[in-house]
Image: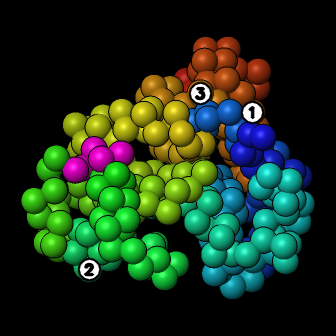
Amino acid sequence: MPKIIKVKQLDLYYNQFQALKSVNMDVDNNNIIGLIGPSGCGKSTLLRTLNRMNDLIEGVKIKGEILLDGVNIYSSQMEIYELRKRVGMVFQRPNPFPLSIFENVSFGLKVERFTDKKKTAEIVEKSLQAAWLWDDLKDKLNESAIKLPLYQQQLLCIARLLAVEPEVILMDEPCSALDPIATMKVEELMLELKKEYHIVIVTHNMQQAARISDLCGYMLLGEMIEFGKTSDIFTNPRDKRTQDYITGRYG
Ligand SMILES: Nc1ncnc2c1ncn2[C@@H]1O[C@H](COP(=O)(O)OP(=O)(O)OP(=O)(O)O)[C@@H](O)[C@H]1O
Ligand SMILES: [Mg+2]
């Protein structure tokens, strides 16, 4: 059975302010989904609902449903730790822990009280391989992660996610702190990762959305104005508002 998230008629309020308005979206088929739209339109808010990161914010109210393999992630059937493991998040600024490279990647295993040392080392290697860091870092696994260059820190955060075998990877402007060459590297990695994971990426960079996403959603003032194949959104949008945005006529 394919692993899938279904967002249905999702409303989100920050106290009185409605930040998401009846949003529908499916995450499936190993697509990379790009979320675009002007600042403040609700991209990060939508992304955070997918693994309940908004729960940490006071005054948040949600209506509608988000189903992960048919189970409402906001129901008591879904354990939040399990959810965050299955639906992992990469942030704008890389956020490695002030620990060694090895301890960063094995962190999630430790949380799970996984104690097999040999297996842990194998998983660390495999995860660093998958995030294209193994060759560069294999001889300094005990060095501090926060001393790495930014782009390696970001890749390390991805490796840390991969170690706990997520199904969906959420990325909120993962390249905004990176230079163009590092950005390209992360994009290439995403294209590789999509073979095994479903990915949702928020980006301000329209070229990036066009380059790497299969499906794209254009948001405006909390609404999903248009959601469809990236090629259609960029070359043949159905909605005038999407067209105005992608041709730079917005605002
Ligand atoms: N913690 C919060 N409390 C109250 N309002 C918030 C909070 N976080 C976001 N908002 C509001 O919700 C709306 C959507 O914000 P969000 O951060 O999701 O937008 P965004 O599309 O990610 O913007 P950007 O491109 O600037 O990152 C904005 O009007 C914002 O001011
Ligand atoms: Mg944002």
The span from disc 1 to disc 2 (Cα, nearest Å) is: 41 Å
Distance between mark 3 and mark 2 Cα atoms:
35 Å
Magenta stretch bounds: 129-134
* Amino acid type assigned to the residue bearing label 2 in the image: Pro
How far apart in space, not on screen, are marks 3 and 1 (Cα)? Answer: 14 Å
Q: Secondary structure at mark 3?
A: loop
x then y, percent, for residue 162: 45, 55
Between disc 3 and disc 2, the foreground one is: 2
Camera-side mark, 1 or 2: 2
Q: Nearer the viewer, mark 3 or mark 1?
A: 3
Amino acid, disc 1: Glu
Can you identify the residue that label 2 sits on?
Answer: 98
Asked if the residue under mark 1 is in contact with the one under mark 3, i.e. CB atoms within 8 Å, the reply is no
Occupied quadrant, residue 67: bottom right
Q: Give the residue displayed 46% in from the left and 77% down from the top.
A: 114
Q: Please identify the residue farthest to the bottom as the structure is shown.
A: 58
Residue 107's disc number: none
Q: Secondary structure at mark 2?
A: loop
Which image quarter is the C terminus in? top right
* Up-down relation of residue 85 to residue 28 (above or below): below
Rendered image: mark on residue 226: 1
